[in-house]
Image (tube, rainbow, N blue to C red):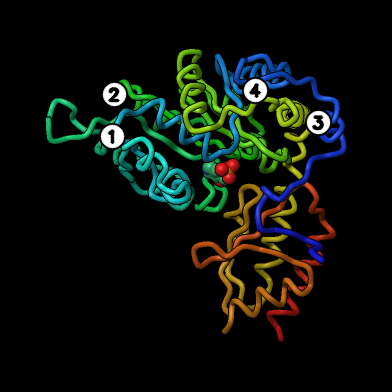
Amino acid sequence: MTKVDLRSDTVTHPSPEMREAIANAEIGDDVFNDDPSVNKLEEIAAAKIGKEASVFVASGTMGNLISVLSHCGRGDEIILGDKAHIFRSEAGGAAALGGVSYHTVRNDARGMLDPSEVEEAIRDSTNDHNPHTAVIAIENTQNNCGGRVLTPQDTKLIADVAHNHELPLHVDGARIFNAAVKLETPVDEMLKEADTVSFCLSKGLSCPVGSIVAGTHEFVEEARRWRKMVGGGMRQAGFLAAAGIVALDQMVDRLAEDHANAKKLAEGLSKIEGVTIDPDSVDTNLVFFEVKHPNKNELMKKLESEGIKGASPYSRWRFVTHYGVDSEDIDYVLEVMANAMAS
Ligand SMILES: *Cc1c(COP(=O)(O)O)cnc(C)c1O
């Protein structure tokens, strides 16, 4: 029996209020634009993040894909971090489906890009040798850099570079609400400089399925066409959108609990012999650490036999706190981990 599943915040189940909203959702056919719950979610989401319009999509991956496809034509280029989810973890979708190439610049330890490197990466489109740069993207929170948070000032630094070159800035904000809660800054303030945004309802906000893509009316109309083309027109999606409406109303502020639990987990892990982690580097709900153990698989199996699941991407370990994991669960994980490392 799994007692504590720390693999990801995507394992979250809907709250009782969400289940009730799902059961009672008013629905229609969203491809005809007449699902009232989807329409309401799209309105609420756009208003909340300070954009003109938004569209409900199946996943964060689809949200980023249709955003990039809306910004770029075949042969165009996206500039983004070398640790970006869009680059590393979305199966090369923009390249495969859109003929878009990825031009990476370095992410620093806290997930930020160097504005001058971004500027240098922008192509001179008057030279026929060059692909056209069509969009610049940042990620907030930056997953692979440890769920680190970029400030509105950070975002502005990159946005200024983009806008000086008449390029749009896309924010992969899968966990933008974690960033906003961490900085105690309204999410629309966090995204003020972003032209387009995608964020997940299905991670810390605990919805069963779904993401939002937002921007200008014109951009969202284009994104809707791409959503249809990649098979994301979901008909009676109001059942899913109903959970999203509850999430935006009720599940944002509680992310602070996940952050507190992550900090407690990081501090506890730092005291265990053989575990390397800097608790100060834990900004939000993602806890990455290194483990010195002769057999990592065996250690993972041992944890699983005690009902604890974690993930081990990219040679490091990752534990993610989320709705459904409480402070006592963290005590339990730390106890099992300490015993497993000592034996
Ligand atoms: C999870 C994630 C995505 C993709 O979301 P899915 O819903 O899993 O497709 C995109 N970007 C970032 C930064 C993520 O963490």
Task: Determine which residue is flagged by label 3.
Answer: 22
Measured as percent of width and height from the top left, residue 153 is found at 48, 31
Q: Position of residue 263 (x, y in %)?
A: 69, 55
The disc placed on residue 165 is 2
Residue in the picture at 49% in, 40% down: 139
Q: Type of residue at label 4?
A: Ala
* Extreme residue toward the bottom, this view: 343
Q: Is residue 264 above or below residue 77?
A: below
Disc 1, SS? helix
> Of marks 1 and 3, which one's residue comes earlier in the chain?
3
What residue would you read off at disc 1? Answer: 119
CA gap, disc 4 and disc 2: 29 Å
Q: Residue at image x 66%, y 50%?
A: 285
- Of pointers 4 and 2, the one earlier in the residue sequence: 4
Q: Residue at x 59, y 30 (%)?
A: 57
Identity of the amino acid at label 3? Ile
In the displayed image of the protein, which residue is found farthest to the left? Answer: 128
State which mark lies toward you, 1 or 3. Answer: 3
